[in-house]
Image (cartoon, rainbow, N blue to C red):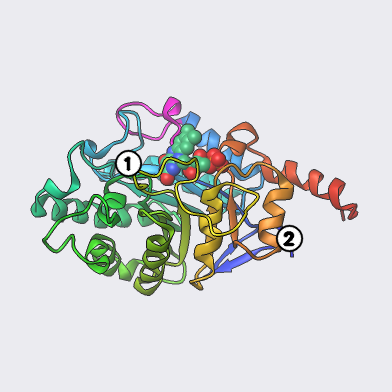
Amino acid sequence: MTIYDEYHLKNIVIKNRVVLPPLVRFSKVGIDGFVTPDLIQWYQDVAQGGAGLIIVEASCVCENGKLRPNQIGIWNDCFIKGLSQIAEICKKYNTPSIIQIHHAGFGEDISTISEMELDLILEKFVVAFFRAKEAGFDGIEIHGAHGYLISQLNSKILNTRTDKYGGTLEKRLYFSKELIKRTKALFNEDFILGYRMGGNEPTLEDGIEIAKKLEEYGVDLLHVSSGIPDPDFKQEAKIHMKHAFPMDWVVYMGVEIKKHISIPVIGVRKIKEEKDASWLIENKMLDFVAIGRGMILKPDWVNWSKNEYFKRTGIKQK
Ligand SMILES: Cc1cc2nc3c(=O)[nH]c(=O)nc-3n(C[C@H](O)[C@H](O)[C@H](O)COP(=O)(O)O)c2cc1C
């Protein structure tokens, strides 16, 4: 098997194992949050460049939950038309696309946000999922990583709440579980439920437990990135790695988490070379590799990598 083998997820055919991870393209979006021709061009370049799956950048469920002023919005029906143009351009190149749904959280401690406020945000995520489906995407990805709102809730360090949103692991995951429950009807065989989680929340052992729960709740595709590390952990790798690994520690977490679940896993971070992507996929350590900055540099990364692959392996291109 190679990174160029297709993968069937529900009814959706993903033509290879290379994913565009969500990348907010600030310079291509205004403060109104609307999709622009420049942004559509970027997704066209990546789709044309051969990516197997496109995860559209973090779209915000409410205006005061943005991570930066110029981030795409999904908090109102008026955004559906622009978003649908991204879904459409991806379809033109037979590239399934899912959109990341996001809330950045507040400057304050997650444990001091009122329960009612979280109930309202949960409802905003629900309607955002409906908008994503209406816009024609093949699914959504919940942004549950990088220290943003859902990552804060999942975090054993930050979430010290004593209401329904905090406590045991199961209760810290209440927001995600309830969101998935309330939107279950959307996720038929043509609509993927993705989840980007922090593999270290704060330890990898916590990440493994979170991943198992997410699988149980019905997540179809897991994307392992970073979470909120233990502040006392000063090394570059924010976890204890049990064995030597030739790539980034975030990729390592994806590989380790995959061993404990049966849904497909996307690994990410600092994967740039074809030989590294191939090593991870050919050895079944991951189901998909995401190439972020590598694709900003080369939107046609997949097509480019094929030449590298044929050169390296000596296999003749058909
Ligand atoms: C410009 C830029 C924007 C990003 N935007 C997002 C985002 O919208 N959502 C997200 O989950 N991660 C985001 N990330 C993180 C990337 O998805 C990815 O995990 C990270 O860049 C590491 O992968 P790479 O080394 O292949 O770039 C962003 C990263 C960069 C550099």
Vertical side of 52 occupied by 283: above or below:
below
Can see residue 173?
yes
Q: Report the side of 134 relative to 8 (left or right).
A: left
* Left or right of residue 268: residue 58: left
Where is residue 74 drawn, in percent x and y?
Answer: 31, 44
Q: Nearer the viewer, residue 278 or 304?
A: 278
x and y, in percent, of residue 156 in the image: 27, 56
Indicate whether residue 27 is drawn in magenta: yes
State the quadrant of the N terminus. Answer: bottom right
The secondary element bearing badge 2 is classed as: loop
The residue type indicated by label 2 comes to Thr
**How far is mark 1 from mark 2, CA to CA?**
38 Å
The prevailing secondary structure element of the residues shown in magenta is loop
Query: Circle 1 is placed at which residue position?
Result: 79
On whether residue 108 falls in the magenta region, the answer is: no
| CB-based contact (under 8 Å), mark 1 and mark 2 | no
The quadrant holding residue 164 is bottom left
183 with respect to 123 (left or right):
right
Quarter residue 179 falls in:
bottom left
The answer to which of 11 and 116 lies nearer the viewer is: 116
At mark 1, the secondary structure is: helix
Q: Position of residue 48 (x, y in %)?
A: 64, 43
Q: Report the number of discs.
A: 2
> In the image, which residues are magenta?
23-36
The residue to which callout 2 is attached is 2
Q: Amino acid at mark 1?
A: Phe
Residue occupying image coordinates x 22% and y 51%: 124
N-term-proximal mark, 1 vs 2:
2
